[in-house]
Amino acid sequence: MPRICLFPGTFDPVTLGHVDIINRALPLFDKIIVGIGLNASKTPMFSASQRQEWIEEIYRDEERVEGVVYEGLTINFCKQIGARFILRGIRYVSDFEYEKTIADANRTLDRTIETIFLTGEPKYTSVASTIVRDIIRNGEMPLLLPELVAKSVLK
């Protein structure tokens, strides 16, 4: 049975921190599906199709990574795509506390799907999409984006 992993998030925008987690998870899984979750309570800066396009372009030479847009509970999407693992990146202890609560809820809903935590590289701990969006809104180009994303934001 292939080891399919879902890496869920908003990826608004895709940052070097996201890319770091995906790249370091590649040896662990046969397939990583980057799930761009639609959340009615959030208003993204970039369209879901733009975020999916970034993932697809960044990983165009890596067939084991795919960007997909989804709605609803992450655990239900895992079942839909056959993912037995959920990947989450951790920067700080506070991230772990929040993510563990979600992992516990997911485990209650389906005990066959395991959450895997990877800690981010120290150089990316300050990389948060919220901060990056604020920098972009104020007319600056953050150095925290993959080159492809930075170029498309400049347009």
Image (cartoon, grey):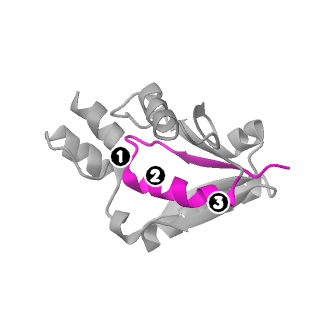
Inspect this view and state whether residue 38 appears. Answer: no
Q: Secondary structure at mark 2?
A: helix
Q: Secondary structure at mark 3?
A: helix
Magenta includes 8? yes
Residue annotated with mark 2: 19
Would residue 78 be found to the left or right of residue 141 on screen? right
- The residue depicted at 45 percent of the width and 52 percent of the height is 18
Amino acid type, residue under disc 1 in the picture? Pro
Image position, residue 107 (x, y; %): 73, 59
Q: Are marks 1 and 2 in contact (CB under 8 Å)?
A: yes
Q: Are marks 2 and 3 in contact (CB under 8 Å)?
A: no
1 or 3: tag closer to the N-terminus: 3
Q: Are marks 1 and 3 in contact (CB under 8 Å)?
A: no
Image position, residue 45 (x, y; %): 33, 33
Label 2 crowd bin: few (<14), some (14–19), many (20+), radius 10 Å: some
Residue annotated with mark 3: 27
Q: Nearer the viewer, mark 2 or mark 3?
A: 3
Boundaries of the magenta span: 1-29
Would residue 118 be found to the left or right of residue 95 on screen? right
- The residue depicted at 59 percent of the width and 58 percent of the height is 25
Residue annotated with mark 1: 146
Image position, residue 110 (x, y; %): 78, 53
Inspect this view and state whether residue 75 appears. Answer: yes
